[in-house]
Amino acid sequence: MLPSAAVSIFYDEFEVARAFLLVIIPLCAAGFFILKAVRPSPDPFKIRDGFLIVSVCWISATVISALPFMISGAIPHFTDAFFESASGLSTTGSSILTDIEIMPKGILFWRSFTHWLGGLGILFIAIALLPALGFDGMAVAAAELTGPTLSKVMPKLTNSARAMYVIYTAFTLIETFMLMLGGLDWFDALTHSFSTIGTGGFSNYNNSIAHFDSAYVDGVITFFMILAGVNFNLYFIGISRSPHKIIEDSEFRTYLSIIGVSTSGVAVYLFCTGVFHGIGESIRYAIFQCVSILTTTGYCTTDFDLWPAFPKMILFMLMWVGGCSSSTGGGIKVIRILVLFKLIKRGILVRLHPNAVTRIKLKDQNLSIDTVQSITGFVFLYFFLFVVAAVLITLDGYDMTTAITASASSIGNIGPGFNAVGPVMNYSIFSLSIKILLSFLMIAGRLEIFTLLMLLSPRFWNPNR
């Protein structure tokens, strides 16, 4: 929170800076006390411990991140502040703020910075910067990874985490510089870079990226959204070993194919139906919105809720895909979608050739039955939670489109939906209970669902397991 306090002081927002300091000082004191008073257990960490640590840390971090909103008076009610904080750290980008532009600069900086912190994970920062804690980082990282498998690009997980954050920071700085070349001041350029690289979507303006009305800004943000949706391990492998490995990666090729096909379909339809006058303008808005929804960033350059049904259906389908594994994006992830299609193909082949031995391969490796079952189980649970949340929202009196897209957007960490939660609307319309539901849905989606739901199982708390 220190950078946010510094920004507040820079803009003479001393009350806002005071709000940050009122959180920073007592928490630092508490952390110092714990560090000195508590001795670590000699027992090694288990995977189960990692799930507990990740869940508790994310929930407590969300509560703590909400405090500056409340103390400063920007968001006085706890439920609203908790929602905004959960949306920020989970990189969802949904907001309860009805007028963003009247917010203090320090608060706007903090909103976007939570995206950057949550992009690769708060705990991945801890793994990279605090190895002296002496715990098994694999147990923690395995509980928080954004994909079906955890791969280390270097022998030590701490080195892998540092390498990814170097790349993560480099992308942020490069995008900031390029946005400043497009006419943005340092504050807007930096905060929007935080939101882009973290695939969050918080903007400093009510009209989101449409505020700038610049094809150059749209292009820069689109490019970096695409980069943020790629598996960050591939960047390290491409830089340090073999650049061609990036192109050979099946998930990466599928990811680019989805962008190409969806953008082409939406652009052609928008042009042919006269939504936009030129093909260039149609491509500009189509690729931005398709990439924004696919990578779960949630930026908007136009009110796509006014588009015809076909492009809206394409965007709705993209909500379920998300970015690549080990990216900052949410959703089901491209690699899981790829495995599911391979599973369907295998099912057809087995019925045509019952005696044939057909295996599911990914990256020239046979996937184990446990991995395939884990992926199918995750997808089933993902849809189950989506349906339950959508039904609960309709019980609160909202129409089906609003309920479905609000639920899908929250669990997929996307942000905007359709109808009452469309790109020019916000989530302030919901009751306190629905806001709490969506807040935990955002956190569950960010933690790949199982991590948070495991805490509800009595077997998880059995000390003999």
Image: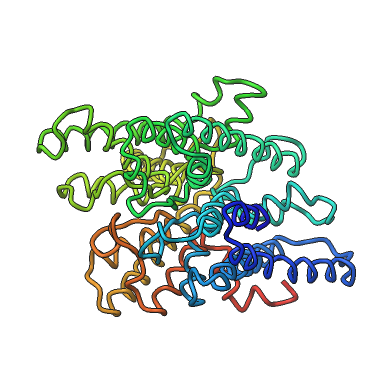
Report the quarter where the C terminus lies.
bottom right
Up-down relation of residue 342 to residue 296 (above or below): above
36 lies left or right of 397: right
Residue at horizontal 69 percent and vertical 43 percent from the top: 161
Report the quarter where the N terminus lies.
bottom right
Up-down relation of residue 168 to residue 409 (above or below): above
Between 273 and 172, the one nearer to me in the picture: 172
Between 107 and 33, the one nearer to me in the picture: 107
Which quadrant would residue 403 be assigned to in this image? Answer: bottom left
Which quadrant would residue 239 be assigned to in this image? Answer: top right
Residue at horizontal 62 percent and vertical 68 percent from the top: 19
Residue at horizontal 53 percent and vertical 31 percent from the top: 177
Residue 303 drawn at (x, y percent):
24, 50
Residue 412 drawn at (x, y percent):
42, 56
Seen from this angle, which residue lies furthest front? 12
Residue 259 drawn at (x, y percent):
35, 35
